[in-house]
């Protein structure tokens, strides 16, 4: 579904060159939920923007559904970190969710149905006539998620969506994302800096090194499909996996460069 | 061919060079337009002719007097409006009751076009006084409104802190109100300067107050288009200089000011 | 009980000072023997005869129609050009110095030139209004379009919102607060130019009529004209605010929320 091979991105501005990503290789199968985690500044957002077609790679391949990405791909939705600024303040919640559907050219009856369904899927059925700035941060992010869901994407990218939200709201939103994923079955790539979150949510965790960024490890999360904030997080297996991810990220931060990078291919690692 | 394209690329990336190109293109357009026949050639001279007329006009003593008159009237009116606007604005803005009770009057008087007063003023006052009144009337509101915004923008925490330290009203104005309001005052001066210039020229053209506007009127009666255009260019340049100075002042004041302002009127 | 008091206080706050000023004017001028400044009573008495309804239809309405036409055209052209220039960095750099110069020319100074080029008729008056109204709208639109939020722009790109929908729902609405600021300035300029365009070499119009009264020494009538102009200015400003509250309702709400959380 998503294939990234030897991806490299260099930002070029005002005489300075910044290598955001050096060599990224991984792939995500259809319907998989994969987390991406790494130290601050390792280029996670850049990676998502490359996948979303908002920027172009310096070298390497990015493809979505076996088609190389040259602009925003069809059937792909991106949920931004700055949820407050990604919603249109002059449109009510329902109009915000409806906008991409209008752009798609769907007829009105279907648009209204999708808006209704996605708003109730995120628990905001009553907020349809409010303006985004009248809602709390957590609710605004739900609107952004509802908008992504209504778009019926085959691929959903999420860029640290819960970074700016309080811990309790974050827990609710994490469970919401898993529910949505299980219900709609799209391919989900979830970028976060929160190590616990990456292990709690994903079926796999891709750990990035710090700059110059490569893929440090592609870790399989063999936790049960039904996850629960209380039970799963105290599960000994979760604690092991989380410990491993944490150690890797610490190593990445200290070494300051990619550890021995993996051979390209879907071969994932597992923790014995 | 490729060298031409690299030059084009470099020009395309430099805003300053593009700007110069734009000016040159504009000058060229004005030069060619009369020759196309779309506008009456005797009433729309080409830029070369305008430039020549400008050179001639600037050498005349009447021009220098007119320029001095215009600048004098403009700056006098602006000064009165700014001082009046700031004083009245701070006084009104600092006392909530006064603010509340004067709000409707301000909203009512503000939109009255000062040109409406021209016929009345002309019968009551001399030319210069009448012109000053319309300048001050229009510019005063620009300053007042901005000062009221500025005073209202004072951080309540700062204000309460000052009050709890028993700072008297004058000290409060100096240390709390004035620094907050300053960027707004500068914006007000910028807007007022533009309005004041317009009304200065209006006074000269309509009321006959001595100055560049009156000169333009005289050239109009004599059907001397090149000189008319030349003086219009001069008034434009005065406006540009005024704008540049006040914009630069605004930027400098805003730079050290941690204010959280919304959109700036252009 | 307190809400009744609050309402009364509100009414008092709105009307106290204006009414007081009006009464002062009334009584101060009551015994005026000054030929040039007749008592307010006389001025108001002369109002109906002077304006209703011939002069209103024959002079005031045409002036207002010209103002409306000039303003509307300035809005249309100003916003269209503003969007085009604001969206393109190189275009903006290209035209910026020229625009800065053109907008600095006091529109009044262009009046004689326009008279020479376009004659003395109605079209010229509309051109005069446009020549002044277009600049605040154009320049504020450029600023508004420049200042759109990049996150919103990315959202549009990523959801492939394009074309007319993008223009209508994103660009124009995002720039609307700034455009409205420009439109407000333009309204004041437009009224000024509407009058000025009729003070020289005109044969009808509100400004012309007032000037006729002044030159014919009919001072009470002249002052009624001045009052009428003032009233028109206030009314147009009121209409503008009502329209603004509709168009920018979301913006006022947004800013109120931001201020409350400050």
Image: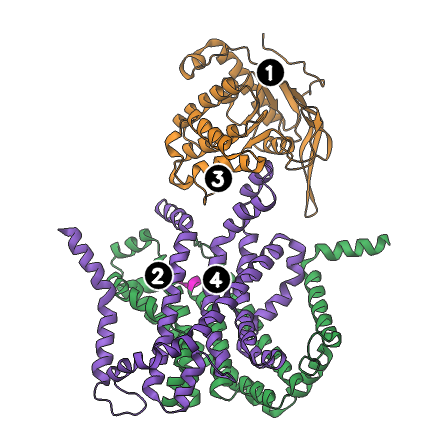
Chain colours: A orange, B green, C purple
Q: Distance between the residues labelled 3 and 2?
A: 32 Å
Please tell me whether mark 2 sits on a helix, a strand or a loop. helix
Q: Where is residue B162 in the image (x, y as percent from the top left)?
A: 29, 56
Q: Where is residue C25 in the image (x, y as percent from the top left)?
A: 25, 80
Mark 1 vs mark 4: tell me if same chain.
no
Q: Of tags 1 and 4, which is closer to the observer?
A: 4
Q: Distance between the residues labelled 1 and 3?
A: 34 Å
Q: Distance between the residues labelled 4 and 3?
A: 26 Å
Mark 2 vs mark 4: tell me if same chain.
no
Residue A181 versus residue B103 in the image, above or below: above
Q: Of tags 4 and 3, which is closer to the observer?
A: 4
Where does label 1 land, which residue?
A219
Q: Of tags 3 and 2, which is closer to the observer?
A: 3
Q: Which region shows up in magenta?
A: B179-184
Where does label 4 land, which residue?
C183
Where does label 2 land, which residue?
B151
């Amino acid at each position: 579904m998503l294939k990234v091979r030897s991806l490299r991105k260099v930002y070029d501005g005002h005489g300075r060159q910044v290598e955001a990503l050096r060599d990224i290789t991984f792939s995500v199968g259809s319907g998989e939920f994969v987390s991406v985690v790494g130290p601050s500044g390792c280029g996670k957002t850049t990676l998502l923007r490359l996948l979303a077609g908002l920027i172009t790679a310096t070298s390497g391949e990015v493809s979505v559904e076996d088609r190389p990405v040259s602009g925003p791909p069809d059937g792909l939705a991106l949920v931004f970190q700055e949820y407050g600024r990604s919603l249109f303040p002059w449109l009510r919640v329902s109009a915000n969710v409806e906008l991409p559907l209008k752009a798609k050219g769907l007829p009105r009856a279907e648009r209204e149905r999708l808006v209704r369904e996605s708003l109730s899927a995120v628990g905001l059925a009553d907020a349809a006539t409010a303006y985004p700035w009248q809602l709390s941060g957590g609710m605004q992010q739900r609107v952004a998620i509802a908008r992504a869901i209504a778009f019926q994407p085959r691929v959903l990218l999420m860029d640290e969506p819960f970074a700016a939200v309080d811990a309790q709201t974050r827990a609710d939103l994490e469970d919401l994302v898993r529910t949505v994923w299980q219900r709609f079955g799209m391919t989900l790539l979830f970028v976060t800096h929160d190590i616990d979150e990456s292990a709690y949510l994903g079926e796999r965790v891709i750990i990035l090194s710090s700059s110059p960024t490569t893929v440090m490890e592609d870790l399989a999360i063999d936790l049960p499909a039904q996850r629960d904030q209380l039970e799963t997080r105290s599960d000994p297996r979760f604690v092991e996996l989380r410990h491993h991810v944490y150690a890797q990220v610490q190593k990445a931060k200290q070494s300051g460069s990619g550890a021995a990078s993996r051979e390209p291919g879907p071969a994932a690692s597992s923790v014995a | 061919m490729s060298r031409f394209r690299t030059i084009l690329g470099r020009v395309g990336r430099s805003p300053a060079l593009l700007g110069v190109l734009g000016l040159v293109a504009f000058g060229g357009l004005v030069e060619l337009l009369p020759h196309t026949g779309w506008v009456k050639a005797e009433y729309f001279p080409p830029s070369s002719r305008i430039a020549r007329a400008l050179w001639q006009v600037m050498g005349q003593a009447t021009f220098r007097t007119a320029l001095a008159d215009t600048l004098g009237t403009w700056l006098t009116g602006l000064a009165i409006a700014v001082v009046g606007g700031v004083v009245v604005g701070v006084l009104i803005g600092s006392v909530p009751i006064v603010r509340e009770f004067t709000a409707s009057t301000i909203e009512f008087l503000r939109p009255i076009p000062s040109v409406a007063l021209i016929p009345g003023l002309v019968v009551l006052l001399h030319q210069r006084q009448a012109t000053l009144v319309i300048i001050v009337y229009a510019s005063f509101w620009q300053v007042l409104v901005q000062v009221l915004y500025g005073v209202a923008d004072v951080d309540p925490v700062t204000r309460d802190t000052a009050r709890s330290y028993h700072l008297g009203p004058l000290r409060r104005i100096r240390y709390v109100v004035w620094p907050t309001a300053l960027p707004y005052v500068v914006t007000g001066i910028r807007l007022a300067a533009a309005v004041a210039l317009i009304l200065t020229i209006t006074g000269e053209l309509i009321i006959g107050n001595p100055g560049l506007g009156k000169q333009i009127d005289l050239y109009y009666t004599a059907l001397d288009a090149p000189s008319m255009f030349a003086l219009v260019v001069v008034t434009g340049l005065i406006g540009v200089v005024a704008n540049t100075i006040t914009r630069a002042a605004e930027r400098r004041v805003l730079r050290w000011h941690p204010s959280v302002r919304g959109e700036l009127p252009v | 009980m307190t809400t009744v008091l609050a309402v009364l206080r509100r009414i008092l706050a709105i009307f106290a000072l204006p009414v007081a000023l009006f009464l002062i004017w009334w009584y101060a001028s009551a015994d005026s023997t000054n030929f040039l400044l007749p008592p307010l009573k006389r001025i108001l008495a002369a109002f109906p005869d002077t304006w209703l309804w011939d002069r209103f239809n024959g002079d005031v309405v045409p002036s207002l129609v010209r103002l409306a036409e000039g303003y509307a055209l300035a809005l249309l052209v100003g916003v269209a050009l503003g969007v085009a220039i604001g969206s393109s960095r190189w275009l903006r750099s290209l035209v910026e110095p020229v625009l800065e110069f053109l907008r600095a020319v006091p529109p009044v100074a262009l009046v004689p030139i326009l008279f020479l080029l376009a004659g003395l008729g109605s079209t010229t008056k509309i051109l005069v209004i446009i020549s002044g109204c277009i600049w605040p709208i154009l320049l504020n639109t450029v600023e508004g379009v420049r200042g759109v939020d990049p996150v919103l722009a990315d959202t549009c790109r990523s959801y492939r919102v394009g074309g007319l929908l993008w223009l209508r729902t994103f660009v124009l609405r995002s720039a609307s607060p700034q455009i409205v600021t420009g439109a407000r300035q333009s309204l004041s300029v437009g009224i000024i130019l509407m009058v000025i365009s009729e003070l020289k070499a005109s044969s009808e119009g509100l400004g012309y009529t007032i000037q006729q009264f002044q030159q014919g020494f009919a001072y009470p009538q002249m002052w009624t004209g001045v009052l009428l102009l003032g009233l028109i200015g206030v009314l147009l400003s009121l209409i503008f605010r009502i329209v603004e509250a509709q168009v920018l309702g979301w913006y006022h709400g947004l800013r109120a929320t931001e201020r409350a959380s400050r």
